[in-house]
């Protein structure tokens, strides 16, 4: 009976623990992405009901496709009145809040696993960085399980190193530049939304009503904090890191523009994207110039946010083989890979260290948002209803942005770095 040396046995245990932890992180990341998708779908339903309610309020009869849509989401014929649909808006909004809170609980579990994974990953990077070539050095390295996390447009050593450098740049953009801005905007949004109930306590349907201009400026502030800008187009990207207009098959459409921090994918064929509605900016500017009402600003903001999404696009990697032979990394390249992985981990820690603060901000967003949307009344005040719709979209967008694209990038990123370390170990023999 052979007995493993203590060092070998310890290494096997560490490998098993690391592999198990990362599988759990990946599973939790996918679960969270499912919750995010549910929130997006519920939001689409909410905004569709709002549009139909507005049609009824403007004495426009329901069309067959609208009736079919309402039935499809479970709204009975008896509720297809203005009052019934306004009540359904409140029901769907409560469901959205429920899913956001559900997501917050799952993020805490996810963050706990990330807390376990990061120190293990750091230790692995340091261990690999100290390795030297063995006598069993080979001209090729076989990658198999690693392909899902490393494969890009091509599966070669040079492409993997190129994608790693791209990954480092994009991760730095997202976690060191975008995230602090998003967190700051969310905190400023809370302060703005807190003033909505008092600002809109009276009727504001007339330009000459005292407080009208102040209320309109508050609406414009909420739009700005959520990056709503009628000027945005292919040649005028959103503010911040999203400076590259890209064309992604199946995502960039006649209705949506797509923006990325940089041109090109990161490891594993991923790309963080900002989907933005493709609106006719001249038409919108004309409306706001000639009829700069609270209603027009609020409805424009809500419509933009309803179609705005930040996510991580994942291209299906076409690997007909379950394994691929590539050139091994040199010792110098292993050191470079380890240094890049250290930098990526540091960027991840900026977000991870703020998990408790993110939760606090989300809770506050929900609290002030729920209070603000309470300005919906049964007296047909169009301005209040439009602002309530805007606030719901602002709260949902800001709460989701505190998670996206960071959760997906971290969940995928830790797996990619582990795959890189495996590639490096195989390279050194």
Image: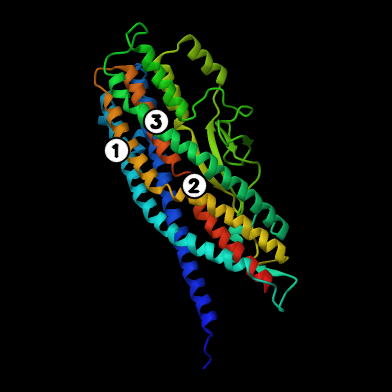
Q: In terms of sequence position, does the residue under pointer 2 or pointer 3 come before the other?
A: 3
Label 1 to label 2, Cα distance in Å? 25 Å
Residue at image coords 36%, 47%: 104
Residue underneath mark 1: 94
Q: Where is residue 206 in the image (x, y as percent from the top left)?
A: 34, 8
Residue underneath mark 3: 189
Label 3, residues with CA under 10 Å away: few <14, some 14-19, many ≥20: many
Dot 1 falls on a residue whose secondary structure is helix
Is 179 located above or below residue 87 in the figure? below
Q: Residue 406 carries which label?
A: 2
Residue at image coords 44%, 41%: 402
Label 3 to label 1, Cα distance in Å? 20 Å
Can you see residue 393?
no
Q: Which mark is residue 234?
A: none
Q: Nearer the viewer, residue 336 or 65?
A: 336
Label 2 to label 3, Cα distance in Å? 20 Å
Dot 3 falls on a residue whose secondary structure is helix
Mark 3 vs mark 1, foreground winner is: 3
Quadrant in which the C terminus appears: bottom right
Q: Where is residue 305 in the image (x, y as percent from the top left)?
A: 45, 30
Q: Is residue 231 left or right of residue 94?
A: right
The tally of labels here is: 3
* Displayed quadrant of residue 147: bottom right
State yes or no: discs 1 and 2 in contact (Cβ < 8 Å).
no
């Amino acid at each position: 009976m052979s007995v493993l040396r203590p060092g070998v046995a310890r290494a096997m245990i560490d490998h098993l623990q690391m592999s198990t932890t990362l599988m759990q992180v990946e599973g939790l990341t996918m679960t969270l992405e499912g919750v995010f998708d549910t929130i997006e779908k519920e939001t689409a339903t909410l905004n569709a009901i709002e549009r139909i309610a507005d049609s009824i309020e403007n004495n426009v009869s329901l069309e067959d496709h609208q009736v079919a849509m309402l039935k499809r989401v479970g709204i009975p014929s008896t509720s297809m009145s203005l009052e019934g649909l306004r009540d359904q808006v409140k029901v769907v909004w409560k469901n959205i809040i429920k899913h956001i809170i559900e997501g917050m609980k799952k993020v805490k579990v996810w963050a706990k696993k990330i807390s376990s994974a990061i120190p293990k990953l750091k230790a692995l990077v340091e261990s690999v960085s100290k390795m030297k070539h063995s006598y069993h050095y080979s001209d090729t390295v076989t990658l198999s399980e690693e392909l899902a996390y490393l494969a890009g447009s091509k599966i070669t050593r040079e492409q993997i190193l190129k994608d790693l450098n791209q990954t480092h740049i994009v991760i730095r953009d997202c976690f060191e530049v975008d995230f602090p801005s998003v967190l700051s905007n969310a905190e400023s949004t809370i302060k703005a939304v807190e003033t909505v109930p008092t600002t809109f306590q009276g009727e504001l349907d007339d330009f000459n009503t005292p407080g009208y201009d102040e209320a309109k400026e508050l609406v414009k502030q909420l739009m700005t904090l959520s990056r709503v800008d009628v000027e945005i187009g292919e040649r005028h990207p959103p503010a911040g890191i999203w400076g590259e207009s890209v064309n992604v098959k199946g995502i960039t459409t006649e209705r949506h523009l797509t923006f990325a921090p940089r041109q090109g994918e990161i490891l594993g064929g991923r790309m963080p994207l900002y989907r933005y509605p493709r609106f006719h900016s001249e038409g919108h500017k004309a409306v706001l110039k000639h009829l700069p009402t609270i209603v027009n600003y609020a409805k424009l903001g809500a419509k933009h946010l309803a179609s705005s999404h930040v996510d991580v696009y994942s291209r299906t990697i076409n690997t007909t083989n379950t394994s691929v032979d590539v050139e091994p990394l040199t010792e110098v390249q292993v050191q470079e890979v380890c240094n890049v992985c250290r930098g990526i981990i540091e960027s991840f820690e900026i977000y991870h260290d703020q998990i408790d603060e993110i939760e606090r901000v989300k809770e506050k967003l929900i609290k002030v948002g729920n209070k603000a949307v309470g300005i919906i009344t049964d007296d047909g005040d169009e301005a209040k209803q439009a602002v309530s719709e805007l606030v719901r979209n602002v709260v949902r967008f800001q709460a989701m942005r505190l998670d996206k694209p960071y959760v997906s990038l971290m969940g995928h990123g830790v797996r990619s770095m582990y795959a890189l370390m495996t590639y490096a170990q195989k390279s050194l023999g």
